[in-house]
Image (cartoon, rainbow, N blue to C red):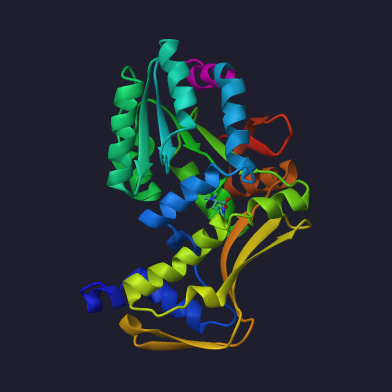
Amino acid sequence: MQENTTQIANSVFAEEVRKGLTDFPKHLSSKYFYDATGDELFQQIMAMPEYYLTNCEFDILERNKAALANLFGEEVDDFSLFELGAGDGKKTKILLKYLSEKGVEFDYRPIDISQNALDQLEASINLELPKVKINTLQGTYFDTLKTIGTAHNKRKIILFLGSNIGNLLHPQAIDFLKQLRAAMNEGDLLFMGMDQKKNPQTILDAYNDKAGITAAFNKNVLTRINNELGGDFNLDNFIHWEVYDPETGTAKSYLVAQHECKVRLEALDLNVRFKPWETIHTEISQKYDDEVVSWLANEAGLSLVTSFADEKNYFKDYIFKK
Ligand code: AVI
């Protein structure tokens, strides 16, 4: 266990874990999947054949880069391309490469909580696309966008790729969109990836791969609790379980206890009991259709400009304005 137990016990992570494991039914937030191991597992997920989302969005960006460059640069000499949670920027580089080859005036401003991720991204852009002006911004999406806010004197294009919004329930997603709207001026654009409803089996396969990478990703939240909160979860006692409701478009991930067990969380001075087959709900991955997207945008005060789909209509990128 890490050293400063008092500090850890009072952290937001600790408090959310306490709440989630003492509630009925139990739950933990998927935002806690992501530490260095979780980031690495997510990279592996994005490379899996079953996880169609990445290739679909690649395809959309590749096939529409010229149209997107026109839209982003329409009626302005210069703009800023902000990206929320840029990661390794693999998909964004398609656009960056095209824009810089065409001599379009813009700067790239990736926002991420991890300075390490930003440093790596900056180094790779400087190496691969030296003409791109990059200005990294470390912080949470909203603190950073609030600081930039409406005072930014160039057009803002805000990218939020990969259907990351799908990890939010609809009310949270509306709140998120409202906050983005508050940081936008007239003329600014929001470019957002949103995974679509499709054959339920395709979705289940994407979140329940045979190699067990998604299972390891899901269980990483337990590893974090063990490492950071002095937990003694036996990972083998839990199975990864995925369900998809084609009516609501919601995929849900669970960890299910196979046997009765007791878990001790030393930093929280907490004992947690699991009955056989008791669940911990860990993640939602919402799938959308045009009607739901219009409803969300409307609730948040945004209007839809246009959208781009991949060949199979598995995934769409939507453009919204204020
Ligand atoms: C980050 N997020 C959009 C991924 C998703 O598809 O919901 C996280 C993920 N969970 C399991 N596989 C991938």
Quadrant of the frame with the C terminus: top right
Q: Main secondary structure of the magenta part?
A: helix
Direction from residue 25 to residue 179 in the image, left or right: left
Task: Give coordinates of residue 43: x percent, y percent.
Answer: 47, 46
Describe residue 270's horizontal placement relative to residue 304 as left or right: left
Q: Is residue 180 above or below residue 24?
A: above
Residue 57 visible, this angle: yes
Q: Residue furthest left?
A: 3
Q: Residue at x 61, y 45 (%)?
A: 51
Give percent across and percent down for residue 288. 69, 47
> Image point 42% across, 39% down: which residue?
86
Task: Determine if the magenta segment contains residue 69.
Answer: yes
**Where 98 sits versus 230, above or below?**
above
What is the number of callouts on the image? Answer: 0
Please state the extent of the stretch shown in magenta in the rendering.
67-75
Residue at 49% across, 32% down? 91
Give yes or no for residue 152 being in the magenta stretch.
no
Q: Residue at x 51, y 61 (%)?
A: 216
Please say whether residue 322 is visible from this viewpoint. no
Q: Quadrant of residue 101?
A: top left
On the image, the x and y values in percent for residue 266 come to 33, 84
**Picture quadrant of residue 105:** top left
Using the rendered view, name the quadrant where residue 127 is placed.
Answer: top left
In this image, 185 relative to 315: left or right?
A: left
Give the camera-side residue of 70 and 25.
25
